[in-house]
Image: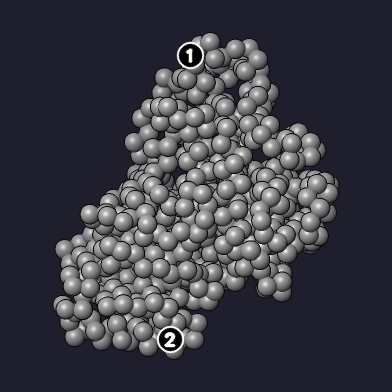
Amino acid sequence: MSGDYIVLTWSIDAASAADTARLMRARAALEAQGDWSLAYQRHGLWVFAQAPALRIQSLTPHEGVLIGDVFDSSGQLETAGVAIAGAQSVEAAARGLARQVWGRYVAIWSSPISGEAAALRDPMGGLDCITWRLDGVSVFASVLPDALLRQVGPALSIDWAVVAGFVDNTLRITGDLALTGLLGIGPGELVQLDRKGMRRTTVWRPRDHVHPRPGKADPIEAVVTTVDRCVGAWARAYPRILAELSGGLDSAIVGSALIGCQIPAPLAWLNAHTDQPQGDERLFATALLERFATAPLKSIARTPMVATPEDFSALADGPRPTLNGSDAPFDAEIACRAKALGAQALFTGQGGDVVFYELQTVLIAADRLMRQGPAGLDRRFLSQVAAWNQVSVWTVLRAAIVAAVGLEFQRWRPPPTWLGPLGQQAGRRRREHAWLTGLSGVAPGKRLQLRQLVYMQVVFGASRRGRDVALIHPLLSQPLVELCLSIPADRLAEDGRGRGLVRRLFAKRLPSIVTARRSKGDMTAFYGLAVAEGLETIRPFLLDGRLVAKGIVDRPALDATLQVEALAHEGRYGDVFDLLAIEAWVRCWEARIAALGHGA
């Protein structure tokens, strides 16, 4: 991925001969690959980076280094040391960063005397961070090349219970790693390492921003300016931009903010379309470009694709399965165009569905009931929510009362029908993501938003397009996320419509054909055909795969699903894509672990 990094830290006073030998061998092996270089060093700390390298800056006090992009409250690139000046401890410094700056970054502290080390991953999780300690050497990395693992890697094995959890609910892919000996640092989490072990502290979590502080101005008044500030900050950091313009509301909002930035226009606006009406949004994208009147619209005609196991295997060597590059032809096409135009970044509208609340659910009625009491459930509101969800008013009313008193809460998504014994066991014993604990007092509709926010971490996963350019998702910027979390779900879904609030707020900027649009682009049929056309290779890959062999997936149930008729009826194409990504990851890492000489 663009901006991958590896950090090695140690004590210059207490490093053993074995530690020193490991460090020297690791440096030689990484530099011998040709794509890694020593980008920063000081006593007891090396930072290796791949081009295009992320920004690197020193942090004082506490002997720190920050890798990535950080902005101040006004959206200007920031020297992060200002945010932690005077911090009395590493934890205080981490909390200062999470509170006073934002961006995509990893902050790492290391004492050259004691060898104690710590890392903070930014609250949005824009950069992954995997860590472990081997004797006196601590490692922090976004990727796991063999050159690193051979020299300073722990003994690895696959944790099949965690893999089973991935299959049961892909939300967990953004949490625990399925490689023993390694720890995946969560967004907003501080991990401190020393010879005695590690200590984990969550310094930022979305739940803390759900209820606005007393005395603060109405957050709705700041939505437009916050979008502009976040988009502008990223645009100034990466001025050579390709921008997705799908024709939907979220990319349109990002596009309108880009036009207002004091930077050159995007190199191009990209719009992909299929030959099916539901997958062709050029009408809306063209209307937007007429309003923006800047760079041309580059239309990408999607020819029918065939899903193959090889598409997933090509991206399977990362620390966790990636769901961000499943559409291999489109991924490769965007990567090619970005490289040809010399783009630094690809801007998307990803995250808007969650942040602005396009989460079709009757639960917002429970939020209104908890916030305003019975008077809030007036006939107009109930009718709007019922129409949005295509249910009766009585269904909405019952759901509001039941959910508000905590009697039931809908699962984020139903489990796959093909779960085997180990997969079912993982579902029963699942451990919640750190962001989804301690939610007492959070309304049901807002809980759903928090759960979806966890899942949105997948957009930071490995992809072909992300190898050469930075993938920037401005609507997942920390200030905007915090602001929209503080707005009640029923206000975000104003008038009983998904993203109803931002439709109104951006109505003056965007053509009504976009803001008043009731439908959304739908690629279901396109991807469904891709799975159906690829069944000849998909079926043996999955049915005779490792997930079936380990009892995580039930072979007869999966066999019944992987039939054209069943897929057409059930429509679980996305689950098949997810299963392919997990199976490919397992096979890749079993082979890598064996080649490293570790146990199975």
Q: Is residue 189 visible?
A: no
**Residue 579 shown left or right of residue 187 in the figure:** right
Q: Which mark is residue 83?
A: none
Judging depth in this view, the residue of 483 and 313 nearest the camera is: 483
In which quadrant will I find the C terminus? bottom left
Estimate the spatial distance between the alpha carbons at disc 2 and disc 1, rounded to whole Å: 64 Å
Q: Residue 515 appears in which quarter of the rendering?
A: top right
Q: Residue 121 appears in which quarter of the rendering?
A: bottom left
Q: Give the residue at x 39% y 86%.
A: 29
Q: Is residue 295 visible?
A: yes
**Dot 1 corresponds to which residue?**
373
Q: Give the residue at x 33% y 55%.
A: 84
Q: Are discs 2 and 1 less than 8 Å apart at CB?
A: no
Residue 218 location (% of width, % of height): 52, 28
Asked if residue 368 is positioned above or below residue 339 in the image, the reply reads above
Q: Secondary structure at mark 2?
A: helix
Which amino acid lies under the numbered mark 1 shown in the image of this protein? Answer: Gly
Asked if residue 171 is positioned above or below residue 544 in the image, the reply reads above
Structural crowding at the residue carrying mark 1, measured as other residues with C-alpha within 10 Å and reported as few (<14), some (14–19) or many (≥20): few
**Dot 2 corresponds to which residue?**
31
Asked if residue 568 is positioned above or below residue 586 in the image, the reply reads above
Q: Give the residue at x 17% y 67%.
A: 195
Residue 200 location (% of width, % of height): 27, 53
Judging depth in this view, the residue of 366 and 485 nearest the camera is: 485
Residue 458 location (% of width, % of height): 52, 54
Q: Secondary structure at mark 1?
A: loop
Q: Give the residue at x 43% y 52%.
A: 101
**Residue 332 shown left or right of residue 354 in the figure:** right
Residue 310 location (% of width, % of height): 60, 70
